[in-house]
Amino acid sequence: MHRTLVVPIACLAVAAASAGAQTAATSSTRSDSLTLLDLLGRVRETHPLVRAAAARVDVVRGSRRTAGSFTNPVLQYQVDDTPLPGRGPIPMDREAMTTVMIPLEPLYQRGPRITRADADVRAAEASARAEGIRLALEAARSYYRAAIAQVTVDVTRDLAAWLDSVVTYNRARAKEGIAAEADFIRAQLEEDRITAELSMQEAELAREQANLLSFLDARMPTASLTLSFPNRPITWRVPELNDTAVRSEERTPAFVERTPQVQAARERVSSAIAGVGAERRMVLRDLSAMLGTKQTAGVTSLIAGVSVPLPLFTQNGGEIARARAERHVAEFELAAAQRSGSAGLQGALDAATVLLKRATALSAPQPGDPASTPAILARADESRRIALGAYREGAVGLLSVLDAARAWGEVRVAYFRVLFAQHESALALAAALGIPPDQVLSSAAPVLQVPR
């Protein structure tokens, strides 16, 4: 009896709509922004490789239709003792025979062929599901690479604007003789450095957005591409996998067997086994039965017979050996898929567990904060504000202000790197369980059931 696994996952769509959800880009919740769920939906519907996988299923279904068809009977009419045109009659009675030759091969060969074709269809369908999950995961990773590039650009732009105000402040103070011109020059240098760094980051953002557009069926300029993402982790729970009382080598095989990669490999083994059976039955070829009538001198008689070739020589010994070798190849590939799936699932589980714990801790808001701003970001904002206030009061030097600003930017980027890595790990865990990422993110399905 199969056990049913439910995986409750807090969806990105739900988190994005929740109150207090902030984004790295000022306010990227516009109606024209691209969410990850939108991207995965377009990949599922329009990506050429997804359509190619579906077309390969149609190809195999066509072969299945051929495997189930019967061989056509052969109708034969024969006349004997008939005079040649222009010659006189011959002193013999005319004979006419009407026969139907019915091939008997389908009686013992059609079954293995259908079994093999059915297994090929199931393997192609499982491979199509695996290809869809793989492409969705690649699209999600491209999305988050573009997202972190967008976060980095936004942070650097904020720093550039903030440093511009510091430069303006020091320029005025230097003209009035209140502060040394060295502070003004140092602030200018830092602003120039940030501006140069911003150019590099904007170029990287353009590249990542262009890579992201390769998953979309649209021709749009990268400048119009705006990403929308929440600043909360995706929560998940897999009780059976997290049960430490059960060893990992005992708890993962059941989940691995239900992944489309392993299902496709197992169906290919079934197909190869049926192929061996079909080749063995091909030892007896061209078996047929004949039924008909014969008219001689006005008398009609019945004709019946069976054509059985004598298998004195084995014509398909090589084909049997080839089919056996294909079965061994399929069995080895199945073992490799099981090993790879088990290791991948364990790695995805461990990574998702670590990142969920860290992302949850980093995204925890400060007590009493109505905006639910993550405490680490709030502390970075407060540190920069205090440093600037202390500098204006003359309590600290310019270097302390610049260090606080640099720390503010590094903390924001590091926070979103961890957050997006946690999002990716949750989607990778779902993919390792055979669950499409867009199904995970759908707000209509907050509770998912792993396919049996």
Image (spheres, helix red, strand yellow):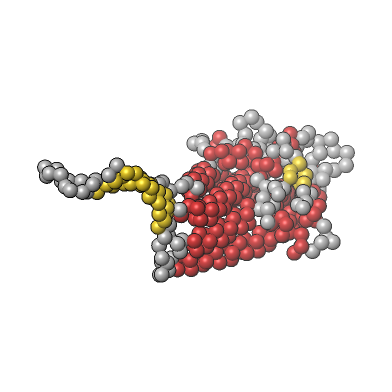
**93, 317: nearer the viewer:** 93
Residue found 36% across the figure and 46% down from its top: 301
Residue 250: where, in percent of width, then height?
Answer: 76, 62
Horizontal arrangement in the rendering, residue 283 relative to residue 31 (left or right): left
Residue found 65% across the figure and 39% down from its top: 37
The relative height of residue 254 versus residue 225 in the rendered view (above or below) is below
The relative height of residue 181 versus residue 312 in the rendered view (above or below) is above
Outermost residue to the right: 368
**336, 18: nearer the viewer:** 336
Residue found 53% across the figure and 39% down from its top: 46
Q: Is residue 203 visible?
A: no
- Quadrant of the rendered image containing residue 14: top right
- Quadrant of the rendered image containing residue 223: top right
**387, 147: nearer the viewer:** 147
Horizontal arrangement in the rendering, residue 390 relative to residue 405 (left or right): right
Residue 436: where, in percent of width, then height?
Answer: 65, 45
**421, 40: nearer the viewer:** 40
